[in-house]
Amino acid sequence: MLTQAPMKVLIVDDEPLARARLKALLQECRDPHAEVMADVGTASAAQAWLREHACDLVLLDVQMPGPDGLMLADSLRNRSGGVPAPLVVFVTAHARHALEAFELDAVDYLTKPLRLERLQATLQRVAQRLREREAAQSAEPAQEGEVLSIFERGRVVRVPLSEVLYMKAELKYLTVRTAQQRYVMDGTLGDWEQRLAGRFLRVHRNALVAKAAVRELDRHGLESEAQGTDFAALDAEGNESWAVRIAVVNEWLTVSRRQLGAVREALKAQAG
């Protein structure tokens, strides 16, 4: 039986005692085994280390001097160069940032004090994500007849990609929306964005939408008849708020300022 290579881990936490505690817990984990490649105290130091080294997982605190953990996770998710970003698990004393963390494709959000059993379960989820990523990268780009295999209540549901309207990150999982139903699956939007390039469009850090399903882009206060969701014309920072209407289900999904230009270009291409 082949021994699986240890999972390579970077620890980022401004508290030396917290880093030492994490290293001690990781040494006790056996399935999978994890190897700490480095531990640093700031997001800037982590970025510098990652420019020269690679790892599978970053165990990341939220509140640190300088750029915080959320900013680091966002920069890793959006970095270029073709090298897959390490997966991220937040380890923090503050539970209030969990929603933001999962919108950044975090595998998990652990609160201190951390128990060995909880860390071990998270490492198993990370290992599964790594296997899924490797399989997706070795596969051919998604074709018209491809299906998603979704494990649901002990059975496997095969959903044709041609029927998928959007994928949305919901805490630890992805919601897959078709005209008739919602499904829940494991995985990250980042992995699917690369595989579905050309057919799906990133409209927000938490949503991928089939280009063919986008019917309208609006910046005014919106109300979805399907969900009763109100969209204010301005976001919390006073900037214009935009959303797209999804065909068939008539749901509205928020469009981030970063993705607004790409959404406009996709709509122009459809009109042409």
Image (cartoon, grey):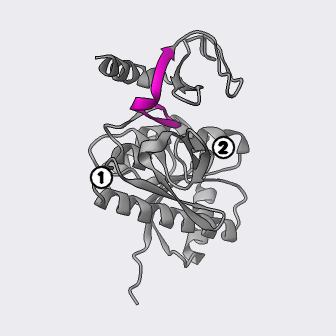
Find the distance from the CA under tag 1 to the CA under tag 2. 29 Å
**Residue 191 on image: x %, y %:** 41, 49
Using the rendered image of the protein, determine whether residue 126 is visible from the camera's viewpoint. Answer: yes
Splitting the image into 4 quarters, where does residue 29 fall?
Answer: bottom right
98 to 20, vertically: above or below: above
Residue nearer the viewer, 211 or 7: 211
What residue did someone put label 1 on? Answer: 52
- Circle 1 residues within 10 Å: few <14, some 14–19, many ≥20: few
Q: Is residue 224 left or right of residue 161?
A: right
Q: Are marks 1 and 2 in contact (CB under 8 Å)?
A: no
96 horizontally vs 67: left or right: right
Whether residue 193 is in magenta: the answer is no
- Using the image, determine if residue 185 lies above or below residue 32: above
- Coordinates of residue 224 in the picture (x, y in percent): 65, 22
Decide which of 70, 232 is in the foreground and name it: 232
- Circle number at residue 156: none
The residue under the point 36% across, 58% down is 136
Q: What residue is at 60 percent from the left and 42 percent from the top?
A: 180
